[in-house]
Image (spheres, rainbow, N blue to C red):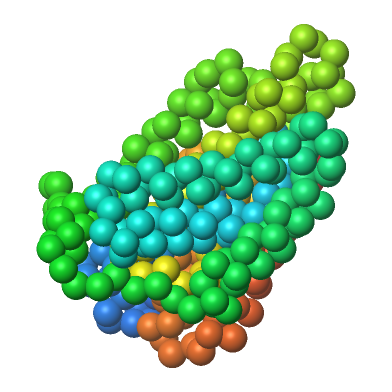
Amino acid sequence: MSMIKKLNLSDAAEVSRFAVLLAFVLLFVFFSLASPSFFSTANLFNVLVNNVVLLAIIAFGMTIVISAGGIDLSVGVSVDVASLAFIALLASGSGVGIAVCGGLTAALIVGVLNAVLITRLRISPFLATLGVLFIGQSVQQIATGGGQPIYLVTGEFAKLFNAIVRTQFIGLPTSVWILVLCAIAVYLLLHRSVFGRYVRAFGAQPGVAWYSGIRVPFNMSMVYIACALLCGIAGILLSSTVRSYVPLSGNAFLLDAVGATFIGTTISTERRPSVIGTLLGVMLLAVVKNGLLLIGWNFYWQQVGIGALVFLVLALSFGLRGRAH
């Protein structure tokens, strides 16, 4: 009897690790049956390009921060200021290279500000990034005369712009390949480097990290700077898609990035964030949003459905894991 019980508990722990993947497969099958257009190549391509790419890049940044035991509520600000600088420079006639550098620099400033507040002034990550969120929103309103969008005008530079962002390689657009490169870079950084070991040490045992000789302020600063730069890349890609800057549009990614990261922790035996887990969480949210839209649910009910799904996945995973222990 004890052997059977031990086997059942082990099975429960194993099932809990695959709760996200199981939910993804079941929902994929359900929406494929509920909506004929869901499984079409055009729709799946749309989900990948428009629902997964930007959120995944931002969520990778959040994955680094949460792995270090922190939180970044200002990811939307990093997205927005990068978008603002990028579009403003393009609209003024600057080259694409200068505009990209300007967008990444603007996001870098947000990351450095977060790093200074958290590592030098010792303000908690929640309060520090919340303050940066409020400041960033106000700066955008002031810089755009009350929140006016900035649209790209037609001209010769727009042709070069289109040539870059619309280019495809092996049938996939530039944005998807940028996502792949970001995923590989974050995976190597977080799971295959000394910096990644430090980051996980901060999240698991912050007290021990301080007394082990690790340069905690420097490495923690790099955590928030890396997150801001990833969000800056997402901001530039967002501007490339809509050909404009829309104030405060980055805030829409905050909760989804946090949710996807925590959903991804369910595949880890240590309940820690990972690149693969976060990507699964992003894909799960993207499929749910797209599927609910296709079957006719309005926006408000979509949020209810997503919230219920997140709760069920986490409850199933942690509930089964609790039984296993």
The picture quadrant where one finds residue 31 is bottom left
Question: What residue do we see at 31% from left, 64% from top?
Answer: 91
Q: Nearer the viewer, residue 134 or 316?
A: 134
Q: Left of 215 or right of it: where is 49?
A: left
Q: Name the side, left or right, on which 297 lies relative to 139.
A: left
Residue 157 seen: yes
Q: Residue at (81%, 26%) from the top-left corner?
A: 205
Q: Quadrant of the C terminus?
A: top right
Above or below — where is 83 with respect to 42?
Answer: above
> What residue is shown at x 26% (from left), y 59% (from top)?
93
Quadrant housing the N terminus: top right
Q: Position of residue 181 (x, y in %)?
A: 34, 37
Q: Is residue 56 visible?
A: no
**In-front residue for pair 27/134:** 134
> Residue placed at 65% from the left, 55% from the top?
74
Q: In this view, which residue lies farthest toward the front?
A: 92
Where's residue 15, x and y in %? Answer: 60, 46
Q: Tell me residue 302's x, y (percent).
A: 55, 80
Work out whether 253 lies above or below 125. Answer: below
Q: Nearer the viewer, residue 40 or 74?
A: 74
Give x and y (percent) for residue 148: 49, 79
Q: How many marks?
A: 0
Looking at the picture, does residue 106 appear above or below residue 302?
above
